[in-house]
Image: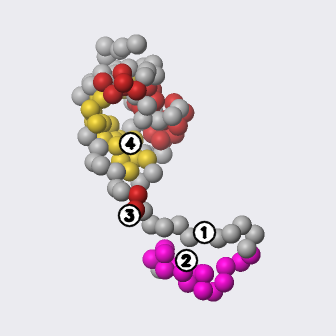
């Protein structure tokens, strides 16, 4: 277990505590503005210290975590859970997710009726 006394990069910590699958995805999330540290937009190399609040937006859901211990190396899930305090709101239930309109592959262009149904689903 690699423990750091001072600070660690935001992208490395997000990857180490398993909030992102890869470090490059964590860095891309930072560059895209999906990561905030203490309310401010974070760059991938921004230093992170114990007590900082990190907000990571993923797929319409925001994870809110507080850094307990900054680590650099990826660790197991049980150890990663000890390195953060999860203050995230509960995820919305799956049944409230809007249904997706699906068509058979190769069915051609949608008919006028299907276009109206699509517009209705999209709220137009």
Q: Earlier in the sequence, mark 4 or mark 1?
A: 4
Q: Position of residue 109 (x, y in %)?
A: 71, 77
Asked whether residue 49 appears in the rendered view, the answer is no
Number of residues whose C-alpha sits closer than 10 Å to that of mark 4, classed few (under 14), some (14–19) or many (20 or more)? many
Which type of secondary structure does the marked residue at label 4 adopt?
strand
In space, the residues marked 2 and 3 are separated at their CA atoms by 18 Å
Task: Say if mark 4 contacts mark 1, CB within 8 Å.
Answer: no
Task: Say if mark 1 contacts mark 2, CB within 8 Å.
Answer: no
- Say left or right for 52 vs 32: left
Q: Earlier in the sequence, mark 1 or mark 2?
A: 1
Q: Camera-side residue: 89 or 54? A: 89
In the rendered structure, find residue 102 and report the number of the disc placed on it: 1
In space, the residues marked 2 and 4 are separated at their CA atoms by 31 Å
Q: Camera-side residue: 12 or 19? A: 19
User: Residue at horizontal 40%, vertical 13%?
Assistant: 1
Task: Say if mark 2 contacts mark 4, CB within 8 Å.
Answer: no
Q: Earlier in the sequence, mark 1 or mark 3?
A: 3
Number of residues whose C-alpha sits closer than 10 Å to that of mark 2, classed few (under 14), some (14–19) or many (20 or more)? some
- Residue linked to disc 3: 96
Q: How is the image coloured?
A: secondary structure
- Residue linked to disc 4: 56
User: Residue at horizontal 45%, vertical 39%?
Assistant: 30
Q: Position of residue 10 (x, y in %)?
A: 40, 30
In the rendered structure, find residue 118 and report the number of the disc placed on it: 2
The answer to whether 121 is drawn above or below residue 82 in the figure is below
Say which of marks 2 and 4 sits in front: 2
In space, the residues marked 1 and 3 are separated at their CA atoms by 18 Å
User: Residue at horizontal 75%, vertical 69%?
Assistant: 106
Q: Earlier in the sequence, mark 2 or mark 3?
A: 3
């Amino acid at each position: 277990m690699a423990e750091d006394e001072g600070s660690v990069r935001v992208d490395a910590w997000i990857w180490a505590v398993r909030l992102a699958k890869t470090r490059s995805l964590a860095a891309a999330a930072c560059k895209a503005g999906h990561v905030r540290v203490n309310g401010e937009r974070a760059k991938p190399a921004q230093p992170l210290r114990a007590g900082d609040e990190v907000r990571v937006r993923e797929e319409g859901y925001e994870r809110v975590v507080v850094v307990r211990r900054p680590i650099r190396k990826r660790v197991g899930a049980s150890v990663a859970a000890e390195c953060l305090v999860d203050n995230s709101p509960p995820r919305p239930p799956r049944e409230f997710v809007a249904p997706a309109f699906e068509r058979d592959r190769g069915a051609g262009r949608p008919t006028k009726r299907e276009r109206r149904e699509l517009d209705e689903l999209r709220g137009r």
